[in-house]
Amino acid sequence: MNDKLRIRVWNEGVHEALNEPSHIGEIYPDGIHGAIAAGLRSYYPDAEITTAVLATDDEHGLDEDILADTDVLLWWGHMAHAEVSEAVVERVHRHVLGGMGLIVLHSGHFAKVFTRLLGTSCSLAWRNEGERELVWTVKPSHPIAEGVDSPIVIPEQEMYGELFDIPDPDDLIFISSFAGGEVFRSGVTFTRGKGRIFYFSPGDQEYPVYHHPQIQRVLANGVRWAAQPELHRSVPAVSNPARGWFDEA
């Protein structure tokens, strides 16, 4: 694996600030972002891995210079989607189109930037009763599935179920099944502009999912796939001339 990657883990940090649930500090003493970053460091010990939090960092920790210097951005959000500024959404959107990788986690399916990139509501069914989740690999040839158990067994997790209102993905890599009988497309990829996007659903704030070794492996593989460190980053030019090619001169 390439150890020279520039990775930024973004978390809204609201659950930790509110101590909701009350045991989140025991599960994630360094925040959800801290746990995700720690897992990635075990795979990329020489990478530049930084974190940002919505509530405490200027410009949500996602200013122009930071994004220009980020190969992959991981995004965890839940309670504060509406608090993400439109300027930051526009900025992240531009950088994804220009080639920055984006990994959207769990309730980040409702993040403004994700719904904008996909063009759908990204709504889904859910129920949180701490049920077992099995994450099945359905495309073992994909790099994100390399070395991953099938199934990954998560003893307790929030249920996400179909219908998941997303466009047909480029790749369907993982499907989850739950104790209640529901299934969910839990690991999917998209390409927008030059950028690669991976959505991966396991990771509710009430359960220690990001400490799971196999979940850490999936995220590390996702970073490697999305990074494209040798890509020439540029935002595609978009024009809307006042006169079309069919107009008379």
Image (cartoon, helix red, strand yellow):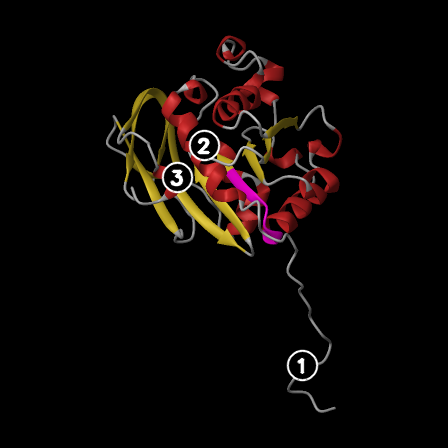
Residue 158 x %, y %: 38, 25
Determine which residue is flagged by label 1: 244
Among the two numbered marks 2 and 1 on one chain, the one whose residue lies closer to the N terminus: 2
Among the two numbered marks 2 and 3 on one chain, the one whose residue lies closer to the N terminus: 3
Residue 18 x %, y %: 60, 15
- Extent of the magenta region: 97-103
Q: Quadrant of residue 57?
A: top right
Q: Provide the secondary structure element on which disc 3 rests.
A: helix
Name of the residue lying farthest toward the bottom: 248
- Foreground of the two, 1 or 202: 1
Determine which residue is flagged by label 2: 219
Determine which residue is flagged by label 3: 144
- Which residue type does callout 3 highlight? Ile
Q: Quadrant of residue 56?
A: top right
Residue 232 x %, y %: 62, 53
10 Å crowding of disc 1: few (<14), some (14-19), many (20+): few
Q: Which mark is residue 178?
A: none
Mark 2 in CB contact with mark 3 (< 8 angstroms):
no
- Foreground of the two, 141 or 206: 141
Residue at 36% across / 25% down in the picture?
Answer: 214
Residue at 57% across / 49% down in the picture?
Answer: 116
Q: Any magenta on residue 102?
A: yes
- Which residue type does callout 2 highlight? Leu
Residue at 64% across / 87% down in the picture?
Answer: 246
- Foreground of the two, 29 or 84: 29
- Which residue type does callout 1 highlight? Gly
In the image, residue 27 sits, relative to residue 175, either above or below, namely above
In the image, residue 225 sits, relative to residue 130, either above or below, namely below
Q: Provide the secondary structure element on which disc 2 rests.
A: helix
Mark 2 in CB contact with mark 1 (< 8 angstroms):
no
